[in-house]
Image (cartoon, rainbow, N blue to C red):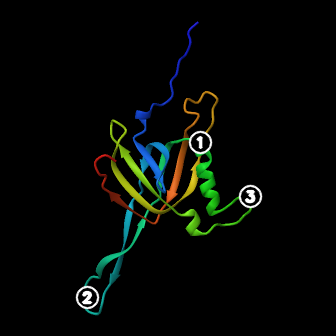
C-alpha cells in the first residue's frame, strides 16, 4: 500500500520577514505594500484657460501580508491581540493610538535568507485578519492566510553590511 509523504513549506519559501517594534514577528510568502497616492489640488483665477495643479495630500493603501507564518511562542495569537488593543470585541472598548499603533519593518530576503532590502512602515495597525479556511488535510496548519495592515506612511531603509 502506498504511503503519501508530505513536507511542509521550507524556510526558503518565505522571501519576506516582518519585524514589529524591533522584534521578529513573522515570515511571509507574499506581500502587497499598497499604493502611494497624491491628491491633486486645482486652482484657477479669472482669465485662466485651465486650472493650475499641484500635489496635495499623500495617502497610502493598506498593505497585505499573505501566507504568514508566525515566528515562535504565542505568535499565533499576536495579530488578534494587536487588533484587540485597537478595539476589544469582548469589552467593546477602543484603545488609544499610542498603544495600538506600532512601527514595523518588512525585509525582503535574499536566497540565503539574509535581508536584502527593507521598508519601514510607521503608525501601523492591523485592520483585517483572515485566518483562511481550515481543513484537516491542510499542508500548512501553522500558516495564517492574510493580514491587512493600515499605516500612515512608509519609507525605504538601507541595510548595512552584516545586518
Residue visible at 57% across and 68% down in the picture:
97
Q: Which residue is mark 1?
A: 73
Estimate the spatial distance between the alpha carbons at disc 1 and disc 3, rounded to whole Å: 24 Å
Secondary structure at badge 3 equals: loop
Q: Which residue is mark 2?
A: 48
Mark 3, residues whose alpha carbon is within 10 Å: few (<14), some, or many (≥20)? Answer: few
Q: Nearer the viewer, residue 87 or 135?
A: 87
For marks 2 and 3, the one nearer the N-term is 2
Q: Is residue 27 left or right of residue 93?
A: left
Q: Which residue is mark 3?
A: 90
In this rendering, the answer to whether 48 lies above or below 88 is below
Residue 32: % across, % down: 42, 51
Residue 18: % across, % down: 46, 49
- Quadrant of the drawing holding the N terminus: top right
Residue visible at 58% across and 65% down in the picture:
99
For marks 1 and 3, the one nearer the N-term is 1
Estimate the spatial distance between the alpha carbons at disc 2 and disc 3, rounded to whole Å: 58 Å
For marks 1 and 2, the one nearer the N-term is 2
Q: Nearer the viewer, residue 115 or 87?
A: 115
Q: Is residue 28 left or right of residue 131?
A: left
* Image quarter of residue 122: bottom left
Disc nearest the viewer among 1 and 2: 1
Residue visible at 55% across and 29% down in the picture:
139
Estimate the spatial distance between the alpha carbons at disc 1 and disc 2, rounded to whole Å: 64 Å
Disc nearest the viewer among 2 and 3: 3
Q: Is residue 152 left or right of residue 118?
A: right
Mark 1, residues whose alpha carbon is within 10 Å: few (<14), some, or many (≥20)? Answer: few
Amino acid at each position: 500500500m502506498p504511503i503519501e509523504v508530505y513536507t511542509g513549506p521550507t524556510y526558503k519559501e518565505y522571501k519576506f520577514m516582518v519585524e514589529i517594534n524591533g522584534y521578529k514577528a513573522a515570515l511571509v510568502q507574499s506581500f502587497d505594500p499598497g499604493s502611494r497616492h497624491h491628491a491633486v489640488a486645482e486652482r484657477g483665477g479669472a482669465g485662466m484657460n485651465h486650472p493650475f495643479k499641484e500635489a496635495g495630500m499623500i495617502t497610502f493603501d493598506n498593505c497585505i501580508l499573505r501566507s504568514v507564518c508566525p515566528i515562535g511562542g504565542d505568535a499565533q495569537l499576536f495579530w488578534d491581540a494587536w487588533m484587540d488593543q485597537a478595539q476589544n470585541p469582548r469589552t467593546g472598548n477602543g484603545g488609544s493610538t499610542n498603544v495600538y499603533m506600532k512601527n514595523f519593518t518588512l525585509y525582503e530576503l535574499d536566497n540565503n535568507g539574509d535581508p536584502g532590502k527593507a521598508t519601514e512602515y510607521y503608525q501601523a495597525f492591523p485592520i483585517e485578519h483572515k485566518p483562511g479556511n481550515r481543513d484537516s488535510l491542510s499542508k500548512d496548519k501553522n500558516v495564517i492566510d492574510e493580514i491587512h495592515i493600515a499605516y500612515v506612511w512608509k519609507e525605504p531603509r538601507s541595510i548595512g553590511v552584516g545586518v
